[in-house]
Structures are given as structure tokens and as C-alpha cells.
Image (tube, rainbow, N blue to C red):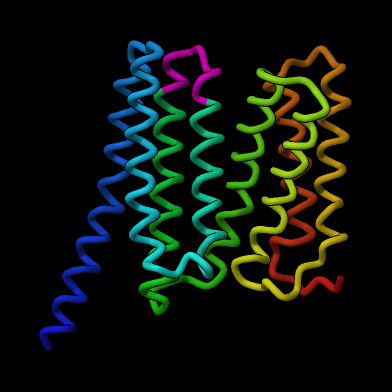
Amino acid sequence: MGRGSSRDNGDRVKTKIYFCLPIVIFFLLTFVFKNPTILRIIIGYSLTGICLLIGIFLLIKGQIKNRWPFILHILICAVSALAFLLIIDISSWIIAFILLFCFIISLLFYNFYQLFNKPRLYKPFRIEKINIWLNFVLSYWVCSVFGFLVDSSLSYLLLSLFFFWLSVYPFLIFQPNRIPWLKLLIPVLVSVEIYICLNFSPLGIFVNALITSLVFTLVSSYLNLSKVEIQS
């Protein structure tokens, strides 16, 4: 009886922490970008990283070997979001973006927590469905940042690795022994090729990122996010 109650209390504490962390991150980032300076950005990003690490530490529970894809996905989401935040120059969009980022972080933590700790409450294919639109959002952030900051062969290589991670991630968390490696290269190569070609157009980095992320999401969703068995 005592063990059961203590476990329930621990679950409630974790639920409250995962609810509070995105709120803390929202106020931190809002404070930073209300009047951004280099010092504020360094302090705000550092504290945001600490908040995320607290949530990740509670999520791992000594099982990093089995849960590392979830942890890496959260970190990739956070890094791409915080980098994208630096290139937005319209204050109203900054607040909207911070809200979106905090919502995504809370959604990821909530669903991962349910999957690990309360599997009976976890809705089947919930993470796969989230990945379909989350891949679009993440790829848009990353393509925008690369278009704004770098334009080199290294940036295309990093972008290819990023797209490949988004494609292989659903298999790592549910079907690690049945990964169609060659087919997963299709959305990567198509998306990077389109991104390179669009760089020669006058559309602008944000439009280029939008087109690239749409193409990648459509192709990758068809190939590996639909839970249809793919033969390698």
C-alpha cells in the first residue's frame, strides 16, 4: 500500500513538473526577447537548457540505451527552435513562436511520459501522428536557419543528416530492426536537391524553407510515417 501511494505521488510530481517546465520556458524566452541583448540571450538560453535537461533526466530514469531516440528528438527540436528564434525580427511573431515551441515541448514530454509510465493511457500511433506535422515544423525551422546563416557544402551535408534523422526516427522508437535504409534516402535526397535549387531563386529564405519542408513532409509521410509495412 505504501509503495503504491508513493509511486502515485511520484507520478503526480512528474506530471506537475512536465506541466510547469514549458510555462517556465515561455516566461524565460519572453523576458529575453522583450528587450534582447547578448547577455540576456546567453542567460535565457542556458536556463532553458537546464529546464529541458531536468525534464529529460526524469524521462530517462536510467534507461538511456532504450530511450535515447526520444531524448535526441527533444534536443533537436529545442536547438532548431532556439536557432530559428534568433532570426525572427517581428515582435508579434516572436511571441507566437515561443508559444508554439512551448506547446510542442509540452506535447512531446506528455506523450513520451505516457508511453513510458502509463502505457494504458497512451493512444496508439499518437507519436506517429504528431511526427507528421512536427516534421514539417522542424524542417521549416532548420531550412530557414541554414538559409539565413550558411550557404556551403557543409550546410547541405548537415541538412541531409537532419532530414535523414527525421525519416529514421519513427523506426528507431518502434521498429529498430526493420529499417528500410535505402528508401529513407528518397525524401532526404529529393528535399536537399529542391532546397539547393531554390537557393538560386528570388523567393527568399522563408519561402524556400516552406516549399522544401512541404515536399519533405509529403514524401516522408508517404514512405515511413503511416504505419504501413515497408519492405526494404
46 versus 161 height, above or below: above
**Magenta stretch encompasses residue 86:** yes
Location of residue 125 in the rendering, given as x and y in whole percent from the top left corner: 57, 68
Location of residue 134 in the rendering, given as x and y in whole percent from the top left corner: 58, 47
Left or right: residue 207 compared with residue 88 = right
Location of residue 102 in the rendering, given as x and y in whole percent from the top left corner: 39, 40
Region rendered in magenta: 85-94
Q: Residue at x 11, y 84 (%)?
A: 2
Splitting the image into 4 quarters, where does residue 120 fall?
Answer: bottom left
Asked whether 94 or 147 is in front, the reply is 147
Left or right: residue 170 compared with residue 216 = left
Q: Residue at x 34, y 41 (%)?
A: 50
Placement of the N terminus among the 4 image quadrants: bottom left
Q: Residue at x 31, y 53 (%)?
A: 18
129 versus 105 height, above or below: below
Left or right: residue 152 compared with residue 227 = right
Location of residue 207 in the rendering, given as x and y in whole percent from the top left corner: 72, 23
